[in-house]
Every structure is written in C-alpha cells, then in structure tokens.
Image (spheres, rainbow, N blue to C red):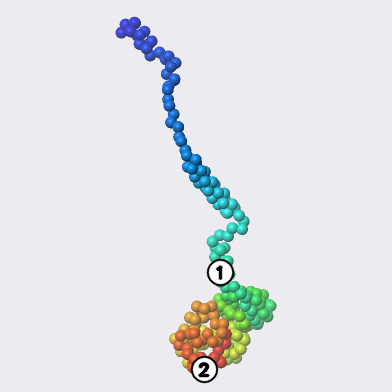
Amino acid sequence: MSREVIDRLSDLTRPTGEEIKMNVSYPRLSVSPKLALAAAAVVAVIIGLVVAHALFRGSPDTLDAPALAHVGAEEETGGEIVVSVVGEVHEPGLVTLVDGARIADALTAAGGLTDGADPAALNQAQLIVDGQQIVVPAVGAAPPPGGTPAVSGGGGGISLNSADASELTTLKGIGEATAAAIIAYREEHGGFREIDELLEVSGIGPAKFEALKDEVTL
C-alpha cells in the first residue's frame, strides 16, 4: 500500500470532535393530577403502615399470643373460692383461691406440708370447689371415721369430688357404670358444686337421688 493511501486513510479516521454532538430527543412523561394524587395517597398509606408496625413491635405493653391466651383463661375461670385447709400444714385455716384451683394450690396457700404430713393421702391434682375442707393427715394416722375422704364438704359421707370408683359403688344403687358416669361428670365440669347435680348424671333419677343424697358430700 502506497504512502499516499495510508495518509488518506489516517485523515479519514482522525476524530473531528463532532462525534459527541448527537441530536437526541428525550420523551416527556405526562402525569395527570388525579394519578399523581392517587400515587401520593398510596405512598402515604405505606409509610403509615410501616410506622405503625414499628411502634407496635416496640411497645412494652404489647402482649404476645401466649400472654393473650393466659388472659383469656383467667377471664373464663373468673371468681374466687374459699376452702378450709386443716391438719398437717404450716398455716391451717381458710384460704382464698381462684376458681378452678387444685389441692396443690390450697396446700401452698396454707404454707405447705409439714414434715409429718402424708402427701400420698391426697390427690394434689384434684380440682376443688368453694366450701370444701381439705384434711391433711399425718403419716400413719388412722383414716377418718366411716372412711370419709380427705377432701369433703365439711360433713360425713362419700365425697363426690374425690371418691374413686370403688368408694362410689358403696353408695345405695350405684354400680360400676354409674360410678364411672359420676367421675366423668366431675372431670368434665370441674367438680360438683351442688349435690343436686347428681340428677344430671346418666343413670341417676329422682328416686335413686333421694336414696343416696344424704350419703354424699362435696
């Protein structure tokens, strides 16, 4: 290739400075006032939700799900009951508990068991009702006259709220099936609150109730 051709090609490819000057037209976006207001409203709502969420999570008074469940349980039970705790406890006497409490709660409220108490004589998981008396026997102590359970309504007789199936079958007209029905009823309803509730137990009619109502207690 001759020198003249090479020089000519160099002249043609040399930058002139005009390359950066490009005539480019940029499109313009036109937004109507209504659309602009709607977009602003959406942004405001999003910002409000973000701020509310941050405040809610940071509040010390916020209750989590287990706490709310606990509050709901307290509202369902509600009320108070008063029971008598006597025998081998540090502070015998009347104690006030929430409705739905168990024997273990009553023993704790009475100062706990003494060293001479027989804890096996009581079913500490048993539900108790208002007006009951809980007798905590000493180790080796003779059972109460007539085999009265350690939890009663204060009088003699078989306790509807603590007697087992074998004790219930000693009542007039109560067989194994009816004893099981009595136990099922007290477990379902949290214990008997009135003797008359026996009439709601399957297998116990008015005649049978009249025959055994004086043999039972709460």
Helix, strand or loop at mark 1: helix
**Frontmost residue, 151 versus 47:** 47
The quadrant of the image that shows the C terminus is bottom right
Helix, strand or loop at mark 2: helix
**Frontmost residue, 12 versus 36:** 36
Outermost residue, left direction?
1
Above or below: residue 21 compared with residue 98: above
Residue at the (61%, 74%) spot, across then down? 79
User: Splitting the image into 4 quarters, where does residue 160 fall?
Assistant: bottom right
Residue 147, position as x, y percentages in the image:
57, 89
The quadrant of the image that shows the N terminus is top left
Residue at the (35%, 11%) spot, across then down? 9
The kind of residue on which mark 1 rests is Ala
The residue singled out by tag 1 in the image is 73
Residue 108, position as x, y percentages in the image:
63, 74
The residue singled out by tag 2 in the image is 211
**Label 2 crowding class (10 Å Cα cut-off): few <14, some 14-19, many 20+?**
few
Residue at the (49%, 81%) spot, across then down? 185
**Frontmost residue, 44 versus 190:** 44
The kind of residue on which mark 2 rests is Ala
**Frontmost residue, 183 versus 18:** 18
Q: Earlier in the sequence, mark 2 or mark 1?
A: 1
Residue 214, position as x, y percentages in the image:
56, 92
User: Splitting the image into 4 quarters, where does residue 134 fall?
Assistant: bottom right
Q: Is residue 81 left or right of residue 169?
A: right
Distance from Cα at disc 2 to Cα at disc 1: 38 Å
Residue at the (60%, 85%) spot, across then down? 153
